[in-house]
Image (cartoon, rainbow, N blue to C red):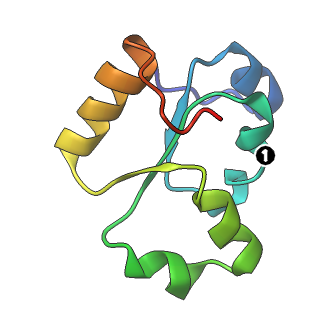
Amino acid sequence: MYDNNQDYLETFANSDAIIHDCGSFTAEYLFTNKPCCYMLKNLDDISKIFLPMGQKCLDNYYKAFNKDDILNFIDNVVIKGIDPMKN
């Protein structure tokens, strides 16, 4: 679901997972203990764009580089609950 609610805390609470490319939410969503997927053009973007704390946060994220990665995340992690990064 696409959500444009301005109260992102409510949105986070009601979500099953997040797929995004917004650096502002990399730490905040981790507190939900729900699956996270970050969209990137390439892995080098992490070290170019994020400070060390953001880089550590993204260690707990699935990465998506294309449509297939996003669909795989939705199908396997969110729907089927196969989440090897949960712990």
Q: Quarter holding the C terminus?
A: top right
Residue 36 percent location from the top left of the image: 55, 39
Closer to the camera, 59 or 26?
Answer: 59
- Image height check: is 75 above or below 59? above
Quarter holding residue 13? top right
Going 75% across and 33% down the picture, which residue do you hit? 6
The reply to whether residue 7 is in sight is no
The reply to whether residue 26 is in sight is yes
Quarter holding residue 67? top left
Closer to the camera, 11 or 60?
Answer: 60
Residue 52 percent location from the top left of the image: 72, 79
In this rendering, position of residue 47 left or right of residue 28: left
Q: Which residue is mark 1?
A: 28
Quarter holding residue 16? top right
Q: Residues within 10 Å of mark 1 (few under 14, many from 20)?
A: few
Secondary element at tag 1: helix
In this rendering, position of residue 13 left or right of residue 45: right
Going 70% across and 23% down the picture, which residue do you hit? 11
